[in-house]
Image (cartoon, rainbow, N blue to C red):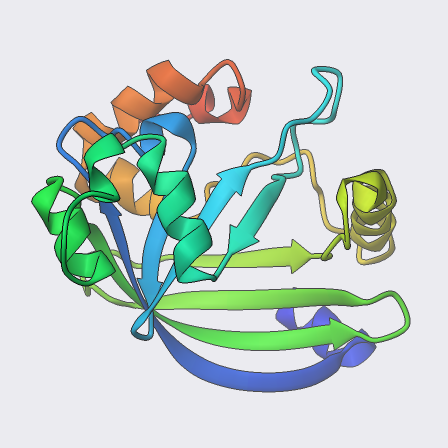
Amino acid sequence: VEDRLARRLVFKSEAEIEDKYLDDERFALTGNDMWLRVRDGNFELKVPMEVDETAGKEIDRYYEINNTDEIMDQLSKVFPSLQASEGTLEEKLKSCGCVPFCHIVSKRKKFVDPQRSITVDLDKVVYPPSFAYCIGEVEVMAEDKSRVAEAEEKINVFMRDMQINSQKAALGKVLAFLLSQRPEHFEFLQESLGRKYPKLLKFKREQ
């Protein structure tokens, strides 16, 4: 796949990315499909976008939030005491029992299709050494909710053009990490998110 991308897309960059994902012992964030991380020292949050029940299950749809105040507003829905606590966001989260559960370092190659405004990231996990995983992500940013269907169609056409099977179930690297390294967390997410994301139910940890 990488060779195919290199022939047809524009290579943009290569970098090493360090991610730490946070949650509490009840899995209060991930159980609500909220993904809080510290990427290279900066907090980022992904929250699910409300879509019609008939929408395809192959494409993930999230709002990506980078503003600290907006992140606080979203997290306060899960941790009501967060706003009242003092300190940095990291200190506030720790006081709520929200601490890192996943630490991943990846080497990322980024390709772009400038004509269609499509970005493709190829990630190879290099840490922890016990977790070897490679994954690709096709991304189109929608300016607002009204443009989501258009963005999804761009992705579907791109996948067909590149002869990539979008129906084949694959886990993102965090979910794959949980399946491999923290199976009890993964099983909890199968129960809490399996109806929304049926592909989760297809995976079982190898003994």
Q: Is residue 207 visible?
A: no
Q: Answer left or right for 121 relative to 79.
A: right
Residue 39 % position (x, y): 35, 67
Q: Residue at x 53, y 19 (%)?
A: 198
Which quarter of the figure is the C terminus placed in?
Answer: top left
Place residue 95 in its image quadrant: top left
Q: Furthest residue to the front? A: 84
Q: How many marks?
A: 0
Q: Answer left or right for 125 relative to 115.
A: left
Q: Residue at x 74, y 24 (%)?
A: 55
Q: Is residue 125 visible?
A: yes
Nearest the camera: 35 or 1?
35
Place residue 186 in its image quadrant: top left
Q: Residue at x 59, y 56 (%)?
A: 137
In the image, residue 94 above or below residue 134: above
Residue 90 % position (x, y): 19, 59
Nearest the camera: 76 or 155?
76
In the image, residue 11 above or below residue 75: below
Q: Answer left or right for 52 relative to 202.
A: right
Q: Residue at x 11, y 49 (%)?
A: 94
Which quarter of the figure is the N terminus placed in?
Answer: bottom right
Q: Answer left or right for 102 relative to 16.
A: left
Residue 204 % position (x, y): 33, 25
Residue 111 % position (x, y): 67, 75
Nearest the camera: 202 or 173?
173
